[in-house]
Amino acid sequence: MRKERGFTLLELLVVIVILSILAALLVPKLTGRVDEAKIDTTKIQLKEVKRALEMYKIDNGTYPTTEQGLKALVQKPETPPVPKKWRQYLEQIPKDAWGNDLIYIYPSDKHPFELKSAGPDGEAGTEDDISVWSE
């Protein structure tokens, strides 16, 4: 008769502990990379929208108002001031990497306009907001 040999409970526990330690070391590093990539993606989207806003101003002499919003880059505004030399500046209005709408305010106190993302927490006015004016 042949005696079949399996894993002992102690061997299984050692393997589980080793896998748990590896997961504890690797998961935070991978998660951090995903967060960094989302922040970088959002910064790129903000810069793209900023360029479109600057082209809008060159063509029309002013930035879209807060009321007209970023929609003015995709569709000609009907609220005053209606631009005379409008053209489509973006195919669509991008969202940040977390799926939230970008925040646009014109005029702004510190800059020609404010353009930002609410950041990872999705709440505007918190520490993790990402502005087109900050590096």
Image: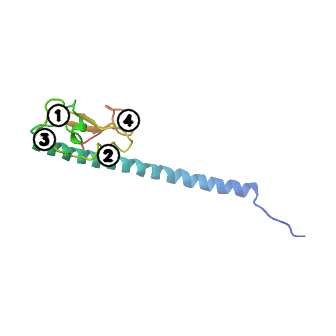
The CA span between labels 1 and 4 is 23 Å
Report the disc number at residue 122: 4
Indicate which label's residue lies in the foreground, 4 or 3: 3
Res. 100 visible in picture: yes
- The residue depicted at 9 percent of the width and 39 percent of the height is 61
**x and y, in percent, of residue 109 in the image:** 17, 30
Q: Earlier in the sequence, mark 1 or mark 4?
A: 1
The CA span between labels 1 and 2 is 21 Å
The CA span between labels 4 and 2 is 13 Å
Residue at the left extreme? 61
Q: Are marks 1 and 4 in contact (CB under 8 Å)?
A: no
92 on left or right of 7: left
Type of amino acid under label 1: Lys
The CA span between labels 4 and 3 is 29 Å
- The residue depicted at 23 percent of the width and 40 percent of the height is 75
Residue, disc 2: 42
**Element under disc 1:** loop
Residue at the bottom extreme? 1
Picture mark count: 4
**x and y, in percent, of residue 111 in the image:** 16, 36
Residue, disc 1: 110
